[in-house]
Amino acid sequence: MNKIFVVGLGPGNLNQATERALEALEESDVIAGYTVYVDLIKDRFAHKEMISTAMKKEVDRCNLAVDEAQKGKQVSMVCSGDAGVYGMAGLIYEIVSARGLERELEVEVIPGITAACSGAAVLGAPLIHDFTVISLSDLLTPWELIEKRLECAAIGDFAICLYNPSSVKRHDYLQKACDIILKYRKPENVAGYVQNIGREGEAGIVTDLKTLRDTKVDMF
């Protein structure tokens, strides 16, 4: 049976990927992924065939990977962090099922260190009790639902990890999120952010919720 690996690379540097992830990449004929993630590993795996697509081309990328696997090639779909946390694992399963290929293609999901955990390690120990992970990207989730999730997490007194905090089109989303949380938390509530986790330029800043609200951040 042909196989597709869905591989979590961890935060970026391959020394933080699991041994199983590296084994799967070596076993593969083709490595597919978002251009930014493929660029992180292309030097190490230059001897492999690479398929990459831009942001918002996730469905195209996964279909291309499935196409290659149907040709009898071993394929790895790489994801930043963990393959199942805002990764491609679910979409690969959906496409394999929609195309009726369950008996033809085996899917193996290989976990990786997600940003909540790798970022927490840089900041100290913010996740030693219950916590929640919320993406501020509204590409697939309506902002009204994101607001509801933020409000519920704030009411529930969870430690809150925010993914995709800001972009060119969503430049004020972190500010909006903090405003919702500030309805239930004090301005001096400890907060922090990490840039370029596991990559060159890594930096972690511990601050407070009021300061975080007015901090300019990006997708890194």
Image: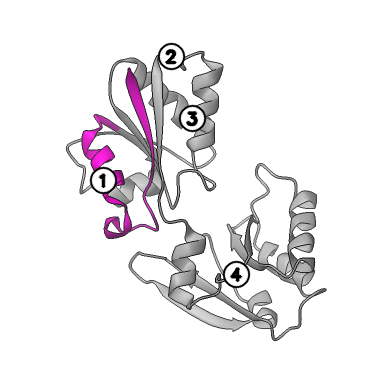
Q: Closer to us: mark 3 or mark 2?
A: 2
Task: Residue 54 in the image: state x and y as whole percent.
Answer: 46, 40
Which residue sits furthest left? 47
Residue depicted at 76% across the width and 83% down the height: 186
> Mark 4 Cα within 10 Å, few/some/many (few <14, many 20+)?
few
Which residue sits furthest front? 129
From the image, tell me which residue sits under label 4.
129
Residue depicted at 73% across the width and 83% down the height: 187
Q: Secondary structure at mark 1?
A: helix
From the image, tell me which residue sits under label 3.
92
Task: Residue 185 in the image: state x and y as whole percent.
Answer: 76, 77
Q: Which residues are magenta?
A: 1-30
Residues at badges 3 and 2 in contact (C-beta under 8 Å)?
Answer: no
Inter-mark Cα distance, 2 to 4: 41 Å
> Mark 3 Cα within 10 Å, few/some/many (few <14, many 20+)?
many
**N-term mark: 3 or 4:** 3
Q: Secondary structure at mark 2?
A: loop
**N-term mark: 1 or 2:** 1
**With 98 as the anchor, is 23 left or right in this view?**
left
Q: Which mark is residue 120?
A: none
Residue depicted at 35% across the width and 64% down the height: 199
**N-term mark: 1 or 4:** 1
From the image, tell me which residue sits under label 1.
22
The answer to if 100 sits in the magenta stretch is no
Inter-mark Cα distance, 3 to 4: 32 Å
Instruction: Tell me the quarter of the picture where residue 7 sits.
Output: top left
Amino acid type shown at disc 3: Ile
Inter-mark Cα distance, 1 to 2: 26 Å
Q: Which mark is residue 103?
A: 2
Which residue sits furthest right? 183
